Image (cartoon, helix red, strand yellow):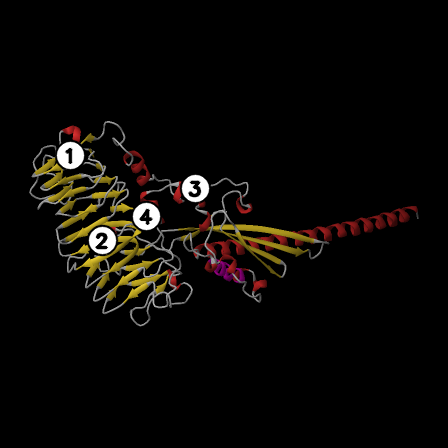
Amino acid sequence: MGSDRSTEKDAGAVIVIVAAAMGAIVMMIALVLDLSGARRDRDADQTAADAMALAGAASLGGSDSTAVAACRAAWGYLVVNLPTSEMAPAPSCSTFSAACAPTVARELVVNVRNHRITITHPVPDHLHALLHDQSSLANDGRPCDRIGIRVQQTRDNLWAAGAVELDVHAVGRLVRGAGDVQAPLVLLSEHACSVLTVSGSSALTVGTASGEPGYIAIDTDGSECSNPNKVVFDLNGQGTVTAGQIAMWALADGDLTSAYSADLLYPEPVASSAPVGRNGMDWRYNCSDANGCPFDEPAHIDDMVAAWGGSGMPSPPGTFTRWTASGRSCALSGATVVPAGQWYLDCGTAGLSTSGSLTFQGGDIVSDGPIKATGSAGLRVNCSDADPSDDVAPATCPMDPPSATTMLLRSGDLLDAGKMELRETTVHLKAGTLRLSGNHTVTWTAPDDPSHRFDDLMLWTTSTAQMKVTGSTSLHLEGILFAPNANVELAGNTGAEALGAQIFARSASLVGGAQLRLVPDEDRILAVGKGHPLLIR
């Protein structure tokens, strides 16, 4: 009997232990279920934040543009990725209707059931909470190119008491200028009206040498078109425009009243998903932290200006020959042939002039002022015979010189007062502009060597002065003309001899009865596009 009582006692103890263990197991299962549910919800929240940041970044405009479109695009991806927000009304994105100020973060906070969504634009540098305690990276870009998303969720536990507070964020950035669109004409003004004007009986044709479509890209949002009779793309008279496509940022809001005059264009312009901007050019030729370049490449333009653009002898010392010290005059006559080498034209802001002909056989050129060659043979650069070190000019310039030339004018304009032939030459105008007239034969080709720092670049100037290109059958250009702050006036008749040039400018006007064709080789221009979004945090 004693044994039976012991067994009964043991059985009772086991029941108590098993019951206690079952309680603990149930609690553990509940905890695991709550934790796994919280982890699942956190992952869903992070997916939504990432998608919103990418969508918002892809829809950002220029640095001075609003971020309303970006806000709306971000919200659209929230609805897709967080089903609980499906029935929630879209918020007003007016918070972002003003131009971006890089140091001032604007926030829109929306509560959707148990979620709290915060959209931030711009995202200032590391002092902002979204980037706090994280060192700045080369890939971060500029504040106005960044949009931040924060998703907070109060999640009630299913089994345990209380709730779990979830908090995730993402920062997206628009990488500008990357793309694959062949656009011989790119106009970069952010707000102006009448950015592209084709007047009278003028005709503008844009294509590519291979026959593939060529595009016109117009960045302005048209906010300065307050006059109801003015539009961004002003085509009047009997003028015509032929292009594969005309892409306009001013159409992004769906309102064409400030964009162009209806029924005058076919095919009709389409809305850009974002402005092209100048980053593609900056990053190719002047990659620096200052312009948010994401690549580990040199800032070729800045480096050149630092070495050559000041006063006195260009750097490094001993590499340039001073013009006047070589016994040459700053006012020449007759035929002058200059041996190949690095030449510093120390002729002051008045520049070097000749009433005869002037031939540089090779090497780089730095001038304090303009170069004026008004004779019948004019100016020839990078034009040599078999012996580039002699004083004999070749009868004709070779199409493929042995190396490229870089010419920097510290002041003054580049004018074609006479015949001009620049072979594989990049010209940097530090403060001047360009005026080319087809009344004289002008032949100008950019460097054609992928290893050269200025491959495909004909001209770089940030001057605001008007740039005038008047075409005729005697005007031959090959490469990229970059004048992002200038209005370019296109006139004349290029006929069958189309310009093989890509033009970047603030605005452009085709005047009179100009018949202008921009038909560059596709491997001699910069392919452009809206860019692509990138998650950086």
In this rendering, position of residue 396 left or right of residue 133: left
Q: Give the spatial CA distance, label 1 vs label 4.
A: 30 Å
Q: Which residue is mark 2?
A: 468
Q: Position of residue 523 (x, y in %)?
A: 25, 51
Q: Could you classify mark 4 by the number of other residues whose Cα lies within 10 Å: few (under 14), some (14-19), or many (20 or more)?
A: many
Look at label 2 and name its amino acid: Lys
Q: Position of residue 197 (x, y in %)?
A: 28, 62
Q: Which residue is mark 3?
A: 138
**Which residue occupies the extreme bottom position in the image?**
263
Q: Position of residue 349 (x, y in %)?
A: 23, 38
Rendering quarter of residue 327: top left
Residue that appears at 17% across and 44% down: 423
Q: Tell me which label, 3 or 4, sits earlier in the chain.
A: 3
Look at label 4 and name its amino acid: Met
Nearer to us of marks 3 and 2 is 2
Q: Give the spatial CA distance, label 3 vs label 2.
A: 38 Å
Q: Give the spatial CA distance, label 2 vs label 4.
A: 21 Å
Look at label 1 and name its amino acid: Ala
Q: Which residue is mark 4?
A: 281
Determine whether the residue tagged by mark 2 lies in a helix, strand or loop: strand
Q: Could you classify mark 2 by the number of other residues whose Cα lies within 10 Å: few (under 14), some (14-19), or many (20 or more)?
A: many
Q: Is residue 478 magenta?
A: no
Determine whether the residue tagged by mark 1 lies in a helix, strand or loop: loop
Marks 1 and 4: CB-CB under 8 Å? no
